Image (tube, rainbow, N blue to C red):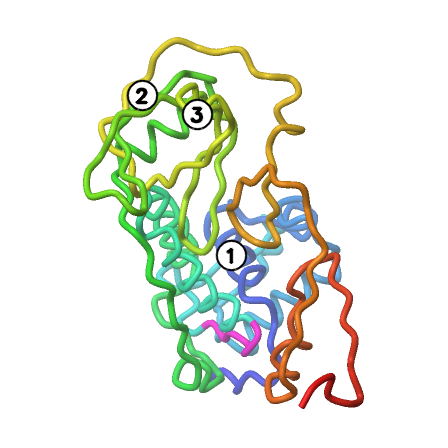
Amino acid sequence: MAKKKENHTKPLRLFKVEQAIQNMSYPNVEKLMAKLEVSRRTVLRDIEELKLYYAAPIEYDKVRKGYYYTDNTYFVKNMMLTESEIFAVTGILPLMERYNNTPLKKTISKVYDTLSQMLPNQVEVQTSFMNDVEFIADPIPVIEEEVFNAVFKATKLHQIMKFDYRSISATEHKPHELHPYKIYSQKGDWYVLGFSPKHNSFSTFTLARMKNISLGDTFEIDPEYKSKVHIDPNFGIWNNSTPPEKVELLFDKSVNTYILERTWHKTRNVIRMKTAPFT
């Protein structure tokens, strides 16, 4: 019977060692070192840990001068994850929710499933983290897959887009044309920035409000477009050409902790007042 595992070893590396011995023909230490890109000491230590903690039936064949499994049906049944690792794995899930309204969800889910398949059938978690933490997702608008793909294609290939768009205050879609330059994502919302012939200026459009996109001819990129775009990522997706102004905000002391613990803008200057400026 295998001894109870006391110290945690990186599961992915152990998995690679196990797979290498399973799939290679009597690999010796040198071959495992080259395959896994680790030191001789690491290979020997990992083999001993597989044998000691996971009851891996690994033996060394003196004739063939390599390692092999005496039981070809063996696999690591339990792979231990530390609290920090399960936090990282679980932390991927809320990030994936931000892409639920885009075709990227399928691709990300496929990658996540591939990583999951690299683990054994049974995964043992040494933490109550899964029960103690809950992620609250932001509400996100639905983006049509055709719209998403068309916008990315047009932006990449510098193609003129024609589409129907419904502004935030409108009740119906109206035709628009755009020369797309860049795509932004913020908290699940996706935007495309480009030159609008209708407005004769650079404008941003929300992908969730677009439909019936058709791609046309290519357009020439304005080499000075960055000087004509006024988006401050600190405040979100707001394209405004108005000259910046200095603003002073006064907050009540009842919310001082909330205000101080956040960086509202990279150029901010916080002044703590000892006495109230008014009564």
Residue for badge 2:
162
Q: Which amino acid does label 2 sit on?
A: Lys
- Apparent side of residue 141 relative to residue 252 in the rendered image (left or right): left
Q: What residue type is labelled 3?
A: His
Secondary structure under badge 2?
strand
Residue for badge 3:
199
Q: Residue drawn at (40%, 53%), measured in percent from left and top? A: 188
In this rendering, the answer to whether 141 lies above or below 242 is below
In this rendering, the answer to whether 69 lies above or below 211 is below
Cα separation, mark 1 vs mark 2, equals 63 Å
Q: Residue drawn at (60%, 52%), measured in percent from left and top? A: 66
Tell which residue pokes out farthest to the front in this image: 279
Start and end of the magenta stretch?
79-84
Q: Which amino acid does label 1 sit on?
A: Tyr
Cα separation, mark 2 vs mark 3, equals 14 Å
Which quadrant does the C terminus fall into? bottom right
Q: Which percent across, then down, holds residue 195? A: 48, 24
